[in-house]
Amino acid sequence: MTATYALTNALGFETKVCSRCGGSGHYSFNAMHGSKCYGCGGDKVQYTKRGRAARDFWVASETVDVTEVQVGDRVIDGRTKFNVAAIETGVHGQRILKDGTREDMRCVTFTSMQGNVFGYGEGIKVRVRRADAADKLAAALAYQDTLTASGTVKKK
């Protein structure tokens, strides 16, 4: 009989040993990526359905429209993370619509504490970490406890 154990990552989301590589982080070799496992990205574990649903809930709770970002917020864009020091909104060029008319392209530009500049078109969603980040993570972990193994909410 094989026992399965639910693991958790550093944040508390439920994970399992990668089913592709068996927890080694390596699979077959290719010249572009070496032997890194595509199932887990070399992390040796994958999210369970419950863990993935809870993590997605957490990320969605931290995601806002780019126009709602405030000075002092920490923006997380993929692997890029920066604290916002200044915000500028303006018109940066035009785009041609399907009917042939032109429309101004509005852009929000953030200056980081290090002086780097990052620009986003209006309507883009970005992930923002604020002072209530611990509360949002706790809510996501509580949400995970209400899920079944298939990642759906338990019926009462």
Image: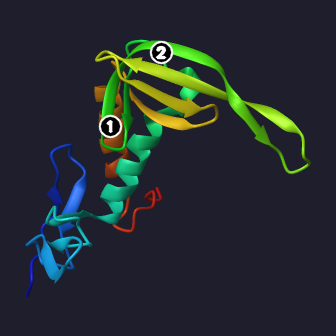
Identity of the amino acid at label 1? Thr
Determine if residue 146 is in view.
Answer: no
- Residue at horizontal 40%, vertical 42%? 59
Measured as percent of width and height from the top left, residue 43 is found at 16, 61
Q: Residue 92 sits in which quadrant?
A: top right
Q: Residues within 10 Å of mark 2 (few under 14, many from 20)?
A: some
Q: Secondary structure at mark 1?
A: strand
Q: Residue at x 33, y 50 (%)?
A: 144
Q: Out of 116 and 133, give the one closest to the viewer.
A: 116
Q: Is residue 124 visible?
A: yes
Please provide percent x and percent y for residue 63: 48, 35
Horizontal side of residue 4 vs 79, given as left or right: left
**Depth order, front residue of 105/155:** 105
- Residue at which label 2 appears: 70
Q: Position of residue 143 (x, y in %)?
A: 38, 45
Q: Answer with left or right where residue 154 lies relative to residue 132.
A: right
